[in-house]
Image: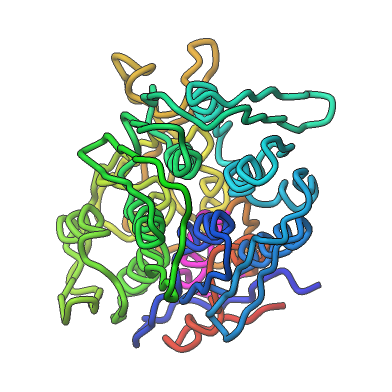
Amino acid sequence: MEDSFLINGGKPLRGSITLSGAKNVALKIIIAALLLDQEVTLKNIPRISDVEELIHLIRSLGAKAEFAEKHVLVVDGRDLRSNKVDLLHASKIRTSFMLFAPLLYKFSSCFVPNPGGCRIGARPIDRIVEGMKKLGISIEYDSNTGFYQAQMKSKPSGFYEFPKITHTGTELLIMLSIFAKDKITLGNTALEPEIDELMRFLNLSGAKIQKNGKNITIQPVDKLTLDQPFEIMSDRNEAITFATLAVATKGKVDISSLHLEDIQTFIQKMREIGAGIDILGKTLLRFYYKSPLKSSRIETQPHPGFMTDWQPNWAILMTQAKGDSIIHERVFENRFSYVEELRKLGADIDFVKIPVSNPMEYFFFNFDPSKKYNQAVKIKGPQNIHGGVLNIADLRAGATLAIAALVAEGESVVNGASILERGYENFVEKVTSLGGEIKKI
């Protein structure tokens, strides 16, 4: 099986791309569509491996999911016949945990395995499980089988405030609250635009969801109905990858179907380091290199902050900036798998300790004082990085290593292409259209 990229780097990338549909929206809305007692047509669904895995998974449960056109998916959950999620396919995608919502409403009980996805930290689900219990759902974990068993003896009700923000937890508890017994309020919820998109889909289908700051209120309804196709937003994480690629290679790339408000923090940081950004239209931005880049200091945090998904790409940009740059990761405790790989290319990047007065509050993961963490790196630039053989460990790190190879002089082999392709549609074709030399081997 071909699972590597052969890349010849060192060339400015120029041209334009149209973003694909957002991975982190498509997966959640495919599952949310199972809550409707009808066929649901979803548009702008990316043809990526995570979507294909989820389609296979819900088909194994009896639901229907077929592409009517290249990016138009028709989902029908009326024939769900199993309340036990397949372990093998669920282990590949973290979104499988959200199947609790449609399965509990269909069968009142279900079995869902520990979620999969990239190993970028422990990604504790205790906040999600606690939230489910607060809404009246019984849930227990069997360490012998690796499955959670949940029961819904009556319709959910209650209130839950997340002790720390969780994207997936917010989305799952919203879905579990749609057909509740009475009003449910969720506090300290995540604010990502991907969550707004899920709420937009549900509200168009008849749900009654309101957001007020970090609080979300859900009034119960009896049924969801959607009488028109739903088109999902474009992928802002893909936008960040190609914006970084444009500036790091000293090129120029126009990115269309991108909403400015979704990446404001990233744009602000790009301007601070001296990158060129032109707003050409409501959903069209140009990113380009215009002068030597300045160093920066960032810390990751949930939206509207600098997203954790963006920092691996940012690291490559900082290898080309003048001075010492700091990246401080607050969201996940294992997000630096790319560091050792970048060193292979000659990057001057090292872990550093940054004192934190209250780590239990400062970090968004469950900080354990007895453990040692590497949560910050210092990057010295500018560096003339060279080609090498690289290994992808997780999705966003994969995009980073591909960018690094396109920036580096000479030839590189990037192993683990299938990991990158979990979240990027037609990556090779898009890079090639910009003048990059890349092929799958």
Q: Position of residue 92 (x, y in %)?
A: 70, 51
Lateral position of residue 123 relative to residue 217, left or right: right
Looking at the image, which residue is at 45% across and 32% down? 181
Identify whether 245 is placed above or below 401: below
Q: Main secondary structure of the magenta part?
A: helix
Q: Position of residue 30 (x, y in %)?
A: 55, 61
Q: Position of residue 125 (x, y in %)?
A: 56, 30
Lateral position of residue 104 relative to residue 173, left or right: right
Lateral position of residue 17 relative to residue 398, left or right: left
The residue nearer to you, when weighing 150 against 382, is 150
Magenta residues (range) = 395-412
The residue nearer to you, when weighing 146 against 104, is 104
Q: In terms of image quadrants, where is residue 322? A: bottom left
- Is residue 350 in view? no
Looking at the image, which residue is at 43% across and 48% down? 348
Asked whether 144 falls inside the magenta stretch, the response is: no
Looking at the image, which residue is at 35% across and 40% down? 218
For the C terminus, the image quarter is bottom right
The residue nearer to you, when weighing 296 against 350, is 296
